[in-house]
Amino acid sequence: MSDDGRIFREAWIAGVHKHFPGEPKPSYVTPWEETPDWERAAAAAVRGQVRDFMRVSAGRSTCLTREQKGQFVAVCWTAQMYKHFEDPKPGYVAGWGDLPEWQRETDADIFEAIEQGA
């Protein structure tokens, strides 16, 4: 789990640094070693889901648009928020259209990082 989660988290942090307008909140770029256990578990689960999705689609997930890739990551993350929180904050479970642009771009970056073997 640790490697899966760490890879996801590193892709998230890289995306935040690339796409977030201005200075991100410290919690957005918290290093892996300081990331809460629930978030580590969620990150590992989502990376696993993306990897499994790529496998069961026989690698044809590469045909998805960048937006579709980001949407997949966002939906998997939302499910994890419901798993880890009885009543998650609305921002944790926002729909794709309600996510800020920087977060949609970061989610797409995460999928592509996993796709590229990260």
Image (tube, rainbow, N blue to C red):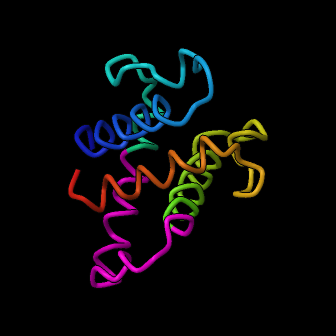
The residue shown at (46%, 43%) is: 42
Compared to 26, does 50 lie above or below? below
Compared to 38, does 64 lie above or below? below
Q: Would residue 86 appear left or right of 5 to someone viewing this image?
A: right
Query: What range is drawn magenta here?
Result: 44-68
The residue shown at (50%, 45%) is: 106
- Give the percent coordinates (x, y) of residue 84: 58, 41
Compared to 96, does 4 lie above or below? above
How many dots with numbers?
0
Q: Nearer the viewer, residue 55 or 87?
A: 55
Whether 47 is among the magenta residues is yes
The residue shown at (40%, 57%) is: 111
The residue shown at (46%, 22%) is: 29
Query: Looking at the rendering, which quadrant does residue 67 occupy?
Result: bottom right
- Give the percent coordinates (x, y) of residue 27: 54, 20
Q: Quadrant of the N terminus?
A: top left
Query: Looking at the rendering, which quadrant does residue 20 occupy?
Result: top right
* Magenta segment main secondary structure: helix
Whether 21 is among the magenta residues is no
Q: Would residue 116 appear left or right of 19 to someone viewing this image?
A: left
Q: Nearer the viewer, residue 22 or 77?
A: 22
- Give the percent coordinates (x, y) of residue 118: 23, 50
